[in-house]
Structures are given as C-alpha cells and as structure tokens.
Image (tube, rainbow, N blue to C red):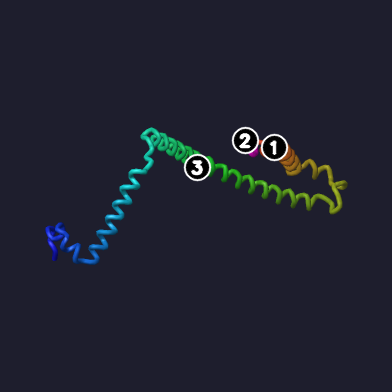
Amino acid sequence: MATSRDLRAGDHVASCAICTDVLAVAAAMRADSDAQWQHANIPSSGQVWWRAEMRARQEAIRKASRPITIAQGVAALLALALTGTAGWFAWTWLRDQAPPLGFASVSAQALTSPLALASVVALGALVVMAPVALYLVLSDE
C-alpha cells in the first residue's frame, strides 16, 4: 500500500493508470469549477430577501385561501344537490298535476300549493340571481 509521501512524490500516480485518469478528471473538474465561479451572477442580499418575502407572502395567501376554496366547493356541491332534489320533486309534482298537453286544466288548488309557490319563487330567484352571479364570476375586479 502506498503511503502519503509516495503519493505526494507522484510515484504512485505516475505508475498507476487509474490514478492518472482520476487526477486528469479531477484537474479538469477543478478548472471548470473555478471558471464557473468567476462567471457566476450572484444576486444581492436585498434581492434574495425580497424574493424570500414575496415567496412567504404567496405561501401565506395560498394557505389562507385554502379553507375558502374548500367552503366554495362544498357550497357549490350542496347547491347542486338542492337544485337536483328540488327539480326532482317539482318534476314529479308537475307530471302528476299537469295534463299531458298543457297547463290550461290545472286546478287552482294545485297552483296555490306550497310546492308550486316555492317552485315559482325559486325560478324567479334563479332568473334574477343568475346574471348577477355570472357578472361577479366573470368580472376582473
């Protein structure tokens, strides 16, 4: 086994092909590393601080908006379920109450039932609120 004195003197490196190759590769890597450090563009400390602050703010905004996003998703799901359920009951009621060809022979009692009133109110709210909701969703503010 070669001692450190033998290695320093270069006797082992000169006689060992593997060590000669390792030395050549290490020297090339060292030269490349030194060249890269000379041309490196290191940002100022102020710029690094500003980027860290912006990243922290964006992360805080993302973290704070996560519950709101979840609540909006749950609200949309519940609204869809409620609309589907109301539509199912309204369709069943309309199919049972209305004649096959028109509403002309629907009784006055059927039109004044709580379900009919609720259906009319829901339809009116939909007609009024749908454009407002679309405006709020599609506006850039």
* Disc on res. 140: 2
Q: Upstream in the sequence, badge 3 or badge 2? A: 3
Report how far apart the C-alphas of labels 3 and 2 lie in the structure. Answer: 21 Å
Report how far apart the C-alphas of labels 1 and 2 lie in the structure. Answer: 19 Å
Q: Which residue is mark 3?
A: 66
Give, as a single range, the part of the protein colored magenta.
137-141
Image quarter (top left, top right, bottom left or bottom right) of the C terminus? top right
Q: Which residue is mark 1?
A: 129
Q: Establish if 58 lies above or below 1.
A: above
On screen, residue 1 versus residue 46, left or right, reads left
On screen, residue 124 versus residue 140, left or right, reads right
Q: Secondary structure at mark 1?
A: helix
Query: Are dots 1 and 2 in contact, CB under 8 Å?
Result: no
Q: Position of residue 12 (x, y in %)?
A: 17, 63
Q: Closest to the observer: 36 or 140?
A: 36
Q: Closest to the observer: 67 or 63?
A: 63
Image quarter (top left, top right, bottom left or bottom right) of the N terminus? bottom left
Q: Position of residue 5 (x, y in %)?
A: 12, 58
Question: Which mark's residue is nearer the viewer, 1 or 3?
Answer: 3
CA neighbours of label 2 inside 10 A, class few (<14), some (14 to 19), many (20+):
few
